[in-house]
Image (cartoon, coloured by chain):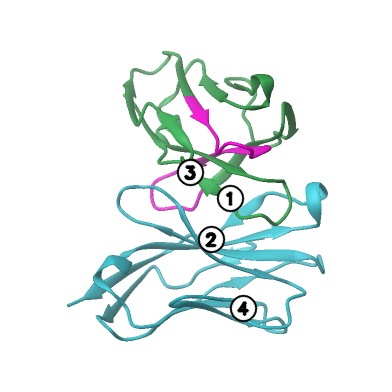
Chain colours: A green, B cyan
C-alpha cells in the first residue's frame, strides 16, 4: 500500500514569492492534516480536513496561508507571500478517521525562504 | 501551558541495551490518546505505539512498550534491545476528546536518541 505522498521534497524561494505544496493521502483515509515543523521542535497542526471540510483551521495564518482539498482526496497548501519565518518542514498526514486512529505522515516538504 | 513535556533533549544508549524516553502530559479531559512517533534523519514521522486513556494494560508493539502511569500523567516509551537503526528523534504526542470532536494532535519537543555500537 502506498504511503502519503508529498511534493516537492525541497523548495527554495525568495521572500514575498508564492509557494504551493501538494499532498496525496493514503487511499481510503478520510482525514487529512497539514503540520508545520520548525527546526528542533515537534510538528504543529495548521489545518485538519474531514473529507472536503476544514474542521480545524484555527492555527492557520489566514492572511497568507490557504488550503484546499477538492473531492476529499488530494490537498494543496499555499503560502502567498512567503516570509523568512515560514522556513520549516511542512508535513502532510492522513488517518482513516478523525478519532484516535494513528496518523500516517508523508516525507514532508522542506521550505527555505531567503 | 505546555501539554506535552519531554525533558530529555538527547539520550545515548549502548546497542542491545534498553532505554526509556520520558513523556509527561497535562489534560483535564478524561478521554485522550497518547502516541509515540519516530523521526529519522530522512524526516518522515513513523508511528510506533498508541495508548488510550481508558486502556487497562500498557501498550506493546514488538520492541516498543509504553509505561503508562495515569495518576502521574506520564507515558514513557521503553525500547528494548536497542539497535543502531533506532537512532532518531522521538516525539510523544497527545490527542484529547473523542471521535471527530477530538482536538488536534499535540507534540512534545522531542528526544534525540543515539545508539552506540
Which residue bears the numbered disc 4?
B74
SS for dot 2 = loop
Give yes or no for contact between labels 3 and 2 (Cβ–Cβ under 8 Å).
no
The residue that disc 1 covers is A103
Residue drawn at point x = 51 percent, y = 20 percent = A79
Left or right: residue B88 versus residue A29 is left
- Location of the C terminus of chain A by quadrant is top left
Secondary structure type for disc 3: loop
Residue behind mark 2: B108
Q: Between residues A62 and B117, which one lies in front from this camera angle?
A: B117
Res A1 label: 3
The foreground one among A113 and B23 is B23
Distance between the alpha carbons at the discs numbered 1 and 4: 21 Å
Magenta stretch bounds: A22-43
Work out whether disc 2 and disc 4 sit on a shared chain.
yes
Task: Estimate the spatial distance between the alpha carbons at disc 1 and disc 3, rounded to whole Å.
Answer: 15 Å
Q: Residue at (24%, 80%) from the top-left corner?
A: B15
Amino acid at each position: 500500500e502506498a504511503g502519503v505522498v508529498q511534493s516537492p521534497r525541497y523548495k527554495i524561494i525568495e521572500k514575498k514569492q508564492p509557494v504551493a505544496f501538494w499532498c496525496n493521502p493514503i487511499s481510503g483515509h478520510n482525514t487529512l492534516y497539514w503540520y508545520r515543523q520548525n527546526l528542533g521542535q515537534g510538528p504543529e497542526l495548521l489545518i485538519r480536513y474531514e473529507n472536503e471540510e476544514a474542521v480545524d483551521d484555527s492555527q492557520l495564518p489566514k492572511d497568507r496561508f490557504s488550503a484546499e482539498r477538492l473531492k476529499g482526496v488530494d490537498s494543496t497548501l499555499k503560502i502567498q507571500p512567503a516570509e523568512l519565518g515560514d522556513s520549516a518542514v511542512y508535513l502532510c498526514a492522513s488517518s482513516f478517521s478523525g478519532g484516535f486512529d494513528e496518523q500516517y505522515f508523508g516525507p514532508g516538504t522542506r521550505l527555505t525562504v531567503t | 501551558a505546555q501539554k506535552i513535556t519531554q525533558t530529555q533533549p538527547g539520550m545515548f544508549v549502548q546497542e542491545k541495551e534498553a532505554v526509556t524516553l520520558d513523556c509527561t502530559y497535562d489534560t483535564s479531559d478524561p478521554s485522550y490518546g497518547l502516541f509515540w512517533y519516530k523521526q529519522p534523519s530522512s524526516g518522515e514521522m513513523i508511528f510506533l505505539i498508541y495508548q488510550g486513556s481508558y486502556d487497562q494494560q500498557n501498550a506493546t508493539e514488538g520492541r516498543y512498550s509504553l509505561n503508562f502511569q495515569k495518576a502521574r500523567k506520564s507515558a514513557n516509551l521503553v525500547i528494548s534491545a536497542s539497535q543502531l537503526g533506532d537512532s532518531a528523534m522521538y516525539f510523544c504526542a497527545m490527542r484529547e476528546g473523542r471521535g471527530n470532536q477530538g482536538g488536534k494532535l499535540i507534540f512534545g519537543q522531542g528526544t534525540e536518541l543515539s545508539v552506540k555500537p
